[in-house]
Structures are given as C-alpha cells and as structure tokens.
Amino acid sequence: MPNADPTPVDLWSRYEIERADDVATATRVIEAAQALREQLRAEQSDSERRGTYSPAVHERMRESDLYRITAPRRFGGLQLPLPVLTKSVIEIARADPGSGWCYALGAGHQITLASYWPADVQAVAFGPRGEFIAPHNFARTGKALKVDDGWLVDGEFPFGSGVPYSTHFLLTIAASGSDAADDSVTLLLERAEYEVLDDWSGAFGMKASGSNAVRVSGVVVPDARAIIRGFDDTDATSTVGSRLHDDPLYFGRTDGYHYAGLAAVIVGTARAAFDEFERIVTTSMSANIRGAGKADDPVYQEVLGGALASIDSAETLALASAGSYVRAARRAVRSGETFTALDASRMAGLARTAGALATAAIDEMFVYAGTLNVSDGTRMQRYFRDSSMFRTHGRQLPRSSASQLARDYFADSSVA
C-alpha cells in the first residue's frame, strides 16, 4: 500500500498564495513539517511523559522556519497566508497529535500580535528572526487592575497549550479599575513575567500538548502592551497590522481563524490513525474470509475507504476555513466590505465540521482495529484518546456552537 499523502485538488488556491515567489517557500516549510514525522513518531511515548515534544524537535522547528510562517517580513518572518500554517499543523499532528496541538497553539498567534500591537512592540516581540511563540489564554480567573503605569496582573491560568517553548504569553482578561471596567483587556507578557507550572499530567489524551498552567504574580504590564478596545472589532475595515504590513493577513479577528488551527490538529490526528489502520489492515488476516488478508475483505475495504474520504473532506474544510478568513480579510481591507460576526461563525462552522468528520473516522477505525491493536502503548489507542480529548474542548462542543451560528445568522441584516 502506498501510505501516500492524499492531496485534494486545487492545492495552491486553497493556500491563498498571491505572490509567485511564496510558492517555493510554502512548499519548503510544509516539507519541513513532513520531515519531522519519523522523529516525532519515534518519540511519541517520551513526548507524552514529558508533556511536550523534545528540545531536539523544537530546534529542528526553529531551523526549518516553522515558527516564522505567518510572522511579518518586516520583522524577519515569512508572511505566508494562514492556510500554509494550517497545513503545517496537519503534518506535525499526523506525526504526533499532542505535539501538533502544542505547536499549533504556540505558533498560531503571530497573526494576533501583528494585527493589534504597535510597531515598536511588535519589533521587540518578534525579535531579530520573527519568532513569536505564545499561547493565548481567555481567562476565567485572575485579575487585571489598571494602575498608573499599566495593568497589574495576578492569577493562575490553566491550559496554556503551547507554553513550554513560549517566548510570550497572551492573556485576555476582564479589566478593572478604569473606565474600561466593562471591557476586557488583552495583554502581551514577556517570558520573564510569567511562570510555567509543572502541572501538565493526568490528562486522558493530548498528553504531549504542553497545556501547562501559567502563573503571573503581581506583574505590571505596560500600557503599550495592552489592547483594550478594538480587539476583534466587528465594525473594523482595517487594523494596525493590516496598515503597517500592507497585508490583510493581519486583520485580526481571532473568532475567524482560531478554529482552523484546532481543526488542523484533529485532521492530522485522523491522518495518523489512517496510517496506523492501513498498517493493521495490510499486515493482518481476515476472520471473515478464510485465507484472505483484511486488505481483501470488503468490510475492511469499506472502513478504510470511508475513512479516507472523510479525512480528505475534513482536510479540505479545515483549509477552506483558513482560506475563507484570508478572503474575508482581503475584502474588508481592499474594498471596505464588513467582516461580520456571521462570517466568523460560518468559518468556525467549517472548521468544526472538519473536526466532526475527522473524529468520526477515527472512531470507526478504532473499532475495526481490533482489541490487540488498541491496548496500552499502541498508537491507535493514543490517537483515540487524543481525539476524545479534542472533543471536550469548549470550542468544539457541537450544540453550543450550532446555536451561536444560528443566532448570528438571524441577527445578520444581510440575511433575506
């Protein structure tokens, strides 16, 4: 069996690449992500025990520019469209889902920084190479109190996925002590201003996701690194970043692009499960047809073929979600067309549907893999656990997300 990378048609248009010179760069970084597969798979058990991928993998990611994909060229980045990062996440998650989650949530917020913060703050944060690795925590605990020279932050913030190799920490938290008391404030913390707790253990799945808690103890974040109003503004037709970098990629709107990054992880997980299921099917005998292998058994053919179709569809939807963000941002910046809440909800719907297709495929392959192939230490069990953990994420819950999409649909004045 070929164990190839199935590639749905119309590849480069899905990556939303406009500059011809960027095609070669995008190909290079995606191939670099694929090149990590053997090492990441060999280290899966160690990564689970460690709670994240190894320092050696981290260095290979740095050397391969995998932390610079969407960073602005002005500050040393590659400034490639969002779907290129989405595809890179898929490839890393295919090698190890937990590591893919850690990478996605660490490397996925360069757009956030470049969209909203002023140029001098961006220059410091991106550094000389355009590397910015930071989780973004939407806090339900802790406090941010306005003081004379900034924001006094105290609290412990769980599930800082991507934090082990972080350079910064993004925190959106309720504001207090100012005329912005009814608002939230989004703060950019430097690495010396927070502590990564050694508490990531006991999770059912995604054990290598680096989802440690972060502690901030009485740190004053300067006003220059705080965004109060204008973050995810549904009425905006440009941002600091889209103007500074002359690129709609930096239009912001986390509610439009975060979901694609999560979908990419589970699509990669489904690809990993497919690889393992293919190995099982091509090396096992059928109990249904005497003398035949499972690869010649119509039952297993149907499971494998159905899974492949679902995963191909899921990958196409995940990349379409990322691409639709890029297109909506371009329309907003170039023609003044509003990037609506409904637009963002529909992008999220594409990504969540990708997740549903991918997890359903994993479930089916898990059932047909056979008991011996899902015991402790097997890859198929790991992928099933990772998939199950993914489904518990608040942004993946199907009922609440469908209700939000319906509310945005009925509230949108353009809906006839």
Image (tube, rainbow, N blue to C red):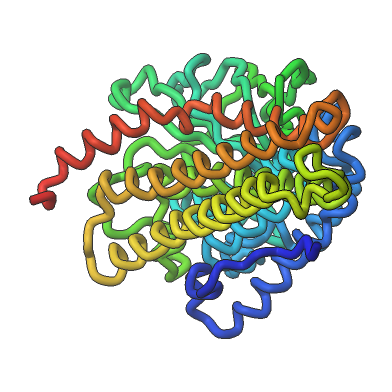
Q: Which of 319 and 293 is in front in this view?
A: 293
Q: Position of residue 154 (x, y in %)?
A: 57, 16
Instruction: Name the side, left or right, on which 367 lies relative to 247.
Output: right
**Which of the pair 29/376 is nearer the observer?**
376
Residue 385, image x, y percentages? 70, 28
Residue 149 visible to an observer of this rendering: no
Residue under the image location 48 percent in, 32 percent down: 396
Q: Is residue 353 above or below residue 372?
A: below
Total marks in image:
0
Is 73 or 263 nearer to us in this picture? 263
At 37% across and 27% down in the image, what residue appears?
399
In the image, residue 288 lies at what x, y percent?
Answer: 76, 40
Hey, which quadrant is residue 4 in on the image?
bottom right
Comparing 408 with 73, the one in front is 408
Q: Can residue 324 be seen in this view?
A: yes
Residue occupying the point 61% across, 79% down: 23
Residue found at x 45% / y 22%: 147
Q: In which quarter of the image is the N terminus?
A: bottom right
Q: Quick check: 99 above or below 90?
A: above
On screen, residue 102 versus residue 379, left or right, reads left
Q: Which residue is outermost to the left?
A: 416
- For the view shown, which residue lies furthest in the front direction? 290
Image position, residue 78 (x, y; %): 63, 68
- Looking at the image, residue 9 sits to the left or right of residue 211; the answer is left
